[in-house]
Image (cartoon, coloured by chain):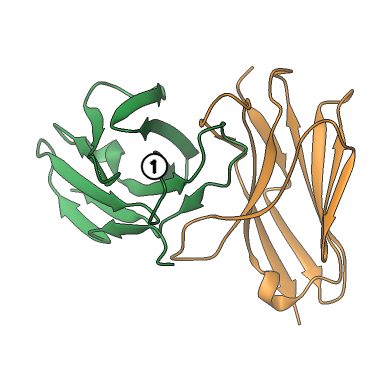
C-alpha cells in the first residue's frame, strides 16, 4: 500500500512533442505528490508538486494532472526539449511526514 | 545560498568495513533526510532528522544509523558493509517544520561502492 507505480520505464520523444509520465498509488492517506527531475551525477530536483484538492497544476511547460478517484497522477511536458532529457520520479507522502515514497523513475530522451 | 553538500562524493570500501557519510544542509534548514538510490530498488527513504532528533525511519536494518548535530549537519553510518549496500546515498534538506510538502532540496549524493 506504500508503493507508487510509475510508467513508462523509458520514453523517447521528438523535440517539440509532449512527454507524458504516469503514476498510480494505493494509500489514500497520501496528500502530497511531487515530481522530481534528476540529471546524471546530480541529486533529484523538485520540478512541480500538487495537493489532492486540485486536479491540475501548471508551471511553464510542466503540468501535473491529478485524478483522486482513480488514485493516479501524471506529468505532462509540453514542447519537450533536448535539455529535458533526464530521469523523472514521481513521489507521494503524507503531509505530516517527511518520508517521500518514490516511483521507479522514467528515463526521458528528447531527440533533436 | 549554497546548496546541500555531501562528502565524500565517492567512496570505495570492502565488505565488513564501516563507513560514515556527511551532509551539510542549506543554511537555515533544520530538517535533513537521507535516501538510498540503487538501480534495482530505486529511491528509498532511510531516515529524517530535525533538531538532532530522528523523526522518521525507513525500513532498513539497524546497520544503518544516523545523527544530526546542533548546527543541523548530519552524518549517516553503515556498519558491517555488504555488497548490496553499494548505492548512491542522497541527503535532502528542508527549511520548514510543517511536513513533507516543504520542498526537499537534494545534494549530489555520495557514491558508495562495496567490494
Q: Please report the residue visible at 73 percent of the width from the left and 72 percent of the height from the top.
A: A110
> Can you tell which chain is drawn green?
B
Q: Please report the residue visible at 69 percent of the width from the left and 18 percent of the height from the top.
A: A29
Element on which disc 1 rests: loop
Q: How many marks?
A: 1
How packed mark 1 is, by other alpha carbons closer than 10 Å (few <14, some 14-19, many 20 or more), is many
Task: In this rendered view, identify the residue nearer to me: A30 or B24.
Answer: B24
Chain at tag 1: B
Find residue B93 and report its horizontal and vertical position in percent. 43, 47
Find residue A65 and report its horizontal and vertical position in percent. 86, 44
Q: Is residue B41 visible?
A: no
> Can you tell which chain is drawn orange?
A
The residue singled out by tag 1 in the image is: B30
Q: Please report the residue visible at 55 percent of the width from the left and 34 percent of the height from the top.
A: A100
Find residue B3 and report its horizontal and vertical position in percent. 42, 63
Q: Quadrant of residue A46?
A: bottom right
As drawn, the residue found furthest toward the bottom would be A112
User: Image height check: is B6 above or below A7?
Assistant: below
* Image quadrant containing the N terminus of chain A: top right
Q: Please report the residue visible at 36 percent of the width from the left and 55 percent of the height from the top.
A: B109
Q: Is residue A105 visible?
A: yes
* Image quadrant containing the C terminus of chain A: bottom right
| A108 sits left or right of A63 in the view | left
Q: Quadrant of residue B26?
A: bottom left
Task: In this rendered view, identify the residue nearer to me: A66 or B14.
Answer: A66
Find residue A8 and report its horizontal and vertical position in percent. 73, 47
| B98 sits left or right of B48 in the view | right
Amino acid at each position: 500500500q506504500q508503493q507508487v507505480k510509475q510508467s513508462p520505464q523509458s520514453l523517447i520523444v521528438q523535440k517539440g512533442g509532449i512527454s507524458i509520465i504516469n503514476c498510480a498509488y494505493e494509500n489514500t492517506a497520501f496528500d502530497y505528490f511531487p515530481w522530481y527531475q534528476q540529471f546524471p551525477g546530480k541529486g533529484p530536483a523538485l520540478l512541480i508538486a500538487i495537493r489532492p484538492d486540485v486536479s491540475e497544476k501548471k508551471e511553464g511547460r510542466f503540468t501535473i494532472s491529478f485524478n483522486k478517484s482513480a488514485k493516479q497522477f501524471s506529468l505532462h511536458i509540453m514542447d519537450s526539449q533536448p535539455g529535458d532529457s533526464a530521469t523523472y520520479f514521481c513521489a507521494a507522502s503524507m503531509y505530516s511526514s517527511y518520508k517521500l515514497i518514490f516511483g521507479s523513475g522514467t528515463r526521458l530522451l528528447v531527440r533533436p | 545560498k549554497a546548496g546541500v553538500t555531501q562528502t565524500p562524493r565517492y567512496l570505495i570500501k570492502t565488505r565488513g568495513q564501516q563507513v560514515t557519510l556527511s551532509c551539510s544542509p542549506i543554511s537555515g534548514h533544520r530538517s535533513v533526510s537521507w535516501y538510498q538510490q540503487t538501480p534495482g530498488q530505486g529511491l528509498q527513504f532511510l531516515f529524517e532528522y530535525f533538531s538532532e532528533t530522528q523523526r522518521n525511519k525507513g525500513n532498513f536494518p539497524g546497520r544503518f544509523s544516523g545523527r544530526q548535530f546542533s548546527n543541523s549537519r548530519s552524518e549517516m553510518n553503515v556498519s558491517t558493509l555488504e555488497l548490496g549496500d553499494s548505492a548512491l546515498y542522497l541527503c535532502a534538506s528542508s527549511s520548514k517544520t510543517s511536513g513533507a510538502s516543504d520542498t526537499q532540496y537534494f545534494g549530489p549524493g555520495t557514491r558508495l561502492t562495496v567490494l
